[in-house]
Image (cartoon, rainbow, N blue to C red):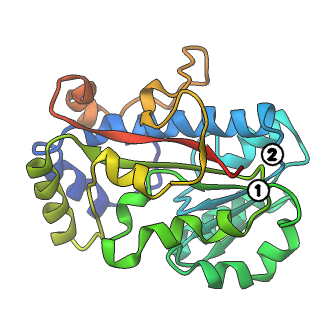
Amino acid sequence: MLGGKDNFDIDRRFLLDLLPAFPECVDIARQNRLFLYRAVRFLAEEAGIRQFIDMGCGLPTDNNVHQVAQAFSPDCRVVYVDIDPIVLAHGRALLASNHNTTVITADMRDQQDILKRPEVDQLIDFSEPVAVLFLSVVHHLADDDDPRRVLRTIIDRAVPGSYLALSQVVTDDPQRGAEMTARINASGIPWRTRQPADIDALLDGLEVVEPGLLDIQRWRPDPDQPSLQPTDPALVPYVGATNRGKGIYEYGGVVRKP
């Protein structure tokens, strides 16, 4: 969906089977990648954050977190976390010469394990503000995973002035959301489409950075930010579906620990 080449036939077949029912997925993936750039730029350039933990980072693509952050402050440090060992292999190749960045294979649901990793201890100083990123991965947390615990373990430990950036697929139509949840879970992918109020409830006590928690297209839009790779021709018919009023979109923003 991001126009890259590092994907597998089973991924492509799953997506092409899903899109007729939920065509918004292409827009959501691309909008989230653009949001990542704007959120990390804000954190590095305006908020002065110099260390980042990116949960569920996925395969490297254009404008990864370390590339955006280090473009604005070369001393930024980034720890990538993903459960997929293929991500580790690709990440190590990408980061071989970058000593301020590392990738670890870990389950984002097990925050205590992540905190014990020596790679985290080496790069992240918890006496200084940190930014924790959960970008387009919160919907992979089932209710039984206790998403509040997962999202807040590190930010609650962190010093004041730390940030949490997140995004999650939501809907204003609970029936359609339930259908999406059932469909994706049936494929073997953990998934929970939520409503915006569900996400708001996880973030009480944290200060919401302007313009707030909202459709991520509207979070500090910048028509001049770097563009993504062209959309795969097979996916072009689905571009623009989030603007056709079916009520599924990516919701999120940035919050600060006071």
Q: Where is mark 2, residue-wise? A: 49
Q: Quadrant of residue 180?
A: bottom left
Res 38 visible: yes
Residue drawn at x 36%, y 41% is: 250
Residue receiving disc 1: 130
CA neighbours of label 1 inside 10 A, class few (<14), some (14 to 19), many (20+): many
Compared with residue 198, is residue 120 higher up or lower down, i.e. above or below?
Answer: below
Q: Secondary structure at mark 1?
A: loop
Give the residue displayed 58% in from the left and 42% down from the top: 254
Q: Nearer the viewer, residue 38 or 240?
A: 38
Q: Which amino acid type corresponds to the residue marked 1 in the rendered image?
A: Val
**Front residue (pair 202, 50):** 202
Sequence order check, earlier mark of 1 and 2: 2
User: In the drawing, does residue 222 fall left or right of residue 68?
Assistant: left
The answer to whether residue 156 is above or below residue 105 is above
At a point 66% along the width and 62% down the height, the residue shown is 155
Q: Are marks 1 and 2 in contact (CB under 8 Å)?
A: yes
- Quick check: 203 left or right of 20? right
